[in-house]
Image (cartoon, rainbow, N blue to C red):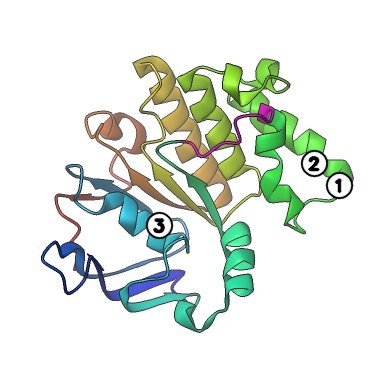
């Protein structure tokens, strides 16, 4: 069965006004377990909007969206929240971290709403992910004290912590130096392949992709009008 399927997906801002803007137009595609989709395009081409809809953060759109054959529009807010937490790991372009909380407290948030890991397993899980991302030494620091690169790795750790089926990554390496960015992308690919995860990656750095993903990905460039 298809994991995710979007049919004739469209998104219009300021509908029926003079400033009406079409950011998504009749997007239709499907993703199966283990697929890798890379999206590249100019700012304003609909990339982040597409991720928000796919990750169940934006419910206002035209078209049909199904997850494992279930129509998303038939789910209530509580059902959407549970499905989002269990199904998706999301890395936002602006991190969306809790500034006054520690890195550890940010990373653990998805586990509070999940049954995948028991309470006694949480600390080990966080240490495991933190060590891989080389942030174990900043777990007790407040997010407000972290650099941009450290924040980005904390955001990636939070996205991975609940072992999601789908990783939605919006410029996950934009604040990192080239060497660390390459290491992070390789880690994401290794994690995805090892655990059969579906990956949707938005990036401007298409030059690095062949060094990381080889030929095992689908690249979409330009405005988000897919078929």
Residue 213 placement: quadrant: top left
* C-alpha span from label 2 to label 3: 27 Å
Residue 43 against residue 124 in the figure, above or below: below
Residue interval drawn in magenta: 95-103
Magenta stretch: includes residue 99? yes
Name the residue rendered at 42%, 65% in the picture: 32
Along the horizontal axis of the image, is 77 left or right of 168? right
Residue that numbered label 2 is attached to: 122
**Dots 2, 1 in contact, CB < 8 A:** yes
Front tag of 3 and 1: 3
Residue labelled with disc 3:
52
Q: Which mark is residue 106?
A: none
The location of residue 27, given as percent across then percent down, is 23, 68
Residue 208 or residue 22, whichever sits in front: 22
Q: Secondary structure at mark 3?
A: helix
Q: Residues within 10 Å of mark 2 (few under 14, many from 20)?
A: some
Q: Quadrant of residue 100?
A: top right
Q: Position of residue 46 (x, y in %)?
A: 24, 54
* Residue at figure coordinates x 30%, y 38% from the top left: 214
Q: Which residue is mark 1?
A: 119
């Amino acid at each position: 069965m298809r994991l995710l399927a979007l049919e004739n997906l469209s998104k219009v801002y300021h509908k029926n006004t003079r400033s009406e803007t079409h950011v998504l137009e009749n997007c239709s595609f499907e993703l199966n377990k283990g697929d890798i989709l890379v999206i590249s395009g100019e700012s304003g081409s609909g990339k982040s909007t597409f991720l928000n809809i796919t990750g169940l953060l934006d419910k206002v759109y035209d078209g049909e969206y199904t997850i494992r054959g279930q129509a998303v529009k038939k789910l209530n807010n509580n059902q959407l929240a549970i499905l989002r937490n269990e199904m998706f790991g999301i890395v936002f372009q602006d991190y969306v971290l809790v500034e006054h909380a520690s890195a550890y407290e940010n990373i653990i948030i998805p586990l509070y709403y999940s049954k995948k890991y028991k309470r006694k397993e949480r600390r080990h899980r966080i240490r495991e992910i933190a060590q891989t991302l080389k942030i174990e030494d900043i777990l007790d620091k407040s997010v407000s004290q972290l650099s941009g690169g450290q924040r980005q790795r904390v955001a990636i750790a939070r996205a991975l912590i609940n072992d999601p089926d789908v990783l939605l990554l919006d410029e996950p390496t934009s604040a990192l130096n080239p060497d660390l960015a390459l290491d992070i992308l390789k880690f994401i690919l290794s994690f995805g392949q090892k655990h059969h995860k579906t990956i949707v990656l938005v990036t401007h750095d298409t030059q690095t992709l062949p060094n990381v993903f080889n030929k095992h990905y689908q690249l979409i460039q330009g405005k988000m009008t897919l078929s």
